[in-house]
């Protein structure tokens, strides 16, 4: 059976967007799929966005950076394509009539275009975890109202989605983590870690922000919050285990003692193709797992002393309310400051913790109160970024 889809790719120029394009092109070339591209978006990487547009031939192209729109129009002048720029154009891309939308914009900036796609009932391939962390209950309710299907693309959540056969019989979920590039580093050494070292992930090729989050283990903390929301699982029934080989992507433990694991090579084309073809599967040329060459698979508990970001995420999930949104906004600000050379690696989690601890009694609202609207989510996000910048200013590298 030929897979038929009309798709939009939000965040087409990042690593997930590039992998999505590779899957789409392979399925079209093999005759396994008939895929029409409605829209693509990019941030500031204009050459990559232009290349993607020439390859995928979308009906609409949006660039987040408005200063680049003239150059984009010029480069695509020979194509029958609509062009937009700015946050409004990204939201327009999400609102256009695609039945499947890849949400791969990094950070809270993905909220508006993802919400636009959810409201009209599209299937959402969710590669952006920050949307759920910031506004999970509101997004899930919006999806329930519209009939939108949330399809997890993060390898860990996609793995759970693939083996979650009896949700009412689940005992616990286990997310695996590679441990990042600093898994064996003492804190003293991590204090001098460079941006290049933090971005050198041992197994996955990712953008700079998510690579730093993986190095601090905040990425796993955000995934913990996302898993709780996606699968309705309380925090105390979600484990995290360090698995350096990144072969087992997650596990589901059932009430009869059975543990089901999804395994595969660390290749994002696998979860992307699963989300694209769901509820079917599509043939892609990802590396096949050869058990005879794997050697040893190892597992260890995360060290919350050396990697406090994971502890902070658990605390935010337990606190509920606005805490996850505050955590995310503060982390985005701190990671940006680290990438800009303003603070050291260990100051990322320290700044986030300072914001969370200072929130109560600061006049910014009770941390336990859940946002009741998307406008309130935006207000909390903005206030947390201001608080984070203040904390970061106190911690600047001399």
Image: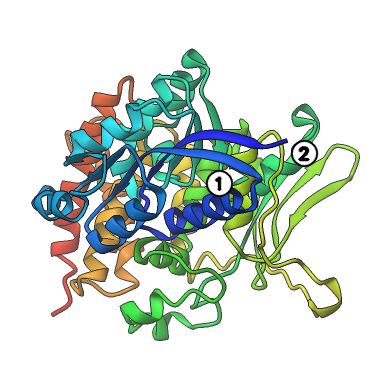
Classify the position of the N terminus by image quarter: top right
- The numbered disc on residue 153 is 1
Q: Secondary structure at mark 2?
A: strand
**Residue 258 rendering spot, x and y as whole percentages:** 88, 45
Q: Is residue 54 left or right of residue 388?
A: right
Q: Is residue 346 above or below residue 254?
A: below
Q: Is residue 95 above or below residue 338?
A: above
Is residue 263 in view from this perspective? yes
Q: Secondary structure at mark 1?
A: loop
Q: In the image, what residue occupies the spot 72% across and 61% down?
A: 264
**Residue 29 rendering spot, x and y as whole percentages:** 58, 53
- The numbered disc on residue 171 is 2
Outermost residue toward the top in this view: 145
Depth order, front residue of 293/189 = 293
Outermost residue toward the right in this view: 256
Q: Quadrant of residue 324?
A: top left
Depth order, front residue of 123/127 = 123
**Mark before the other along the chain sequence, 1 or 2:** 1
């Amino acid at each position: 059976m030929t897979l038929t889809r009309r798709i939009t790719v939000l965040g087409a120029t990042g690593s997930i967007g590039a992998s999505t394009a590779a899957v789409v092109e392979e399925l079209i070339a093999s005759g396994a799929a008939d895929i029409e591209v409605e829209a693509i978006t990019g941030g500031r990487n204009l050459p990559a966005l232009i290349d993607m547009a020439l390859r995928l031939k979308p009906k609409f192209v949006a660039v987040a950076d408005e200063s680049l729109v003239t150059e984009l129009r010029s480069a695509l002048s020979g194509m029958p394509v609509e062009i937009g720029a700015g946050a409004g154009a990204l939201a327009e891309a999400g609102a256009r009539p695609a039945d499947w939308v890849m949400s791969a914009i990094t950070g809270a900036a993905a909220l508006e275009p993802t919400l636009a796609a959810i409201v009209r009932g599209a299937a959402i391939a969710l590669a952006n975890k920050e949307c759920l962390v910031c506004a999970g209950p509101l997004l899930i309710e919006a999806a329930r109202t519209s009939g939108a299907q949330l399809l997890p693309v993060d390898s860990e959540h996609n793995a759970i989605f693939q083996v979650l056969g009896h949700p009412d019989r689940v005992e616990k979920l286990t997310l695996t983590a590679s441990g990042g590039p600093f898994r064996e580093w003492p804190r003293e050494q991590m204090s001098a870690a460079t941006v290049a070292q933090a971005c050198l992930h041992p197994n996955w090729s990712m953008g700079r922000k998510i690579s730093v989050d993986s190095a601090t283990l905040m990425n796993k903390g955000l995934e913990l919050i996302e898993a709780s929301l996606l699968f309705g699982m309380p925090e105390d029934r979600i484990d995290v285990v360090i698995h350096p080989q990144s072969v087992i992507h997650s596990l589901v433990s059932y009430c009869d003692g059975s543990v089901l694991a999804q395994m595969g090579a660390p290749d994002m084309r696998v979860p992307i193709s699963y989300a694209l073809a769901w509820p079917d599967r599509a043939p892609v040329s990802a590396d096949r797992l050869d058990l005879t060459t794997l050697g040893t698979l190892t597992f260890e508990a995360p060290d919350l002393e050396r990697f406090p970001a994971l502890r902070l995420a658990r605390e935010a999930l337990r606190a509920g309310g606005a805490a996850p949104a505050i955590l995310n906004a503060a982390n985005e600000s701190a990671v940006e400051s680290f990438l800009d050379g303003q603070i050291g690696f260990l100051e990322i989690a320290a700044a986030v913790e300072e914001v969370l601890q200072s929130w109560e009694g600061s006049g910014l609202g009770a941390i336990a109160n859940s946002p009741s609207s998307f406008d309130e989510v935006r207000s909390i996000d903005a206030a947390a970024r201001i608080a984070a910048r203040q904390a970061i200013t106190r911690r600047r590298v001399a």
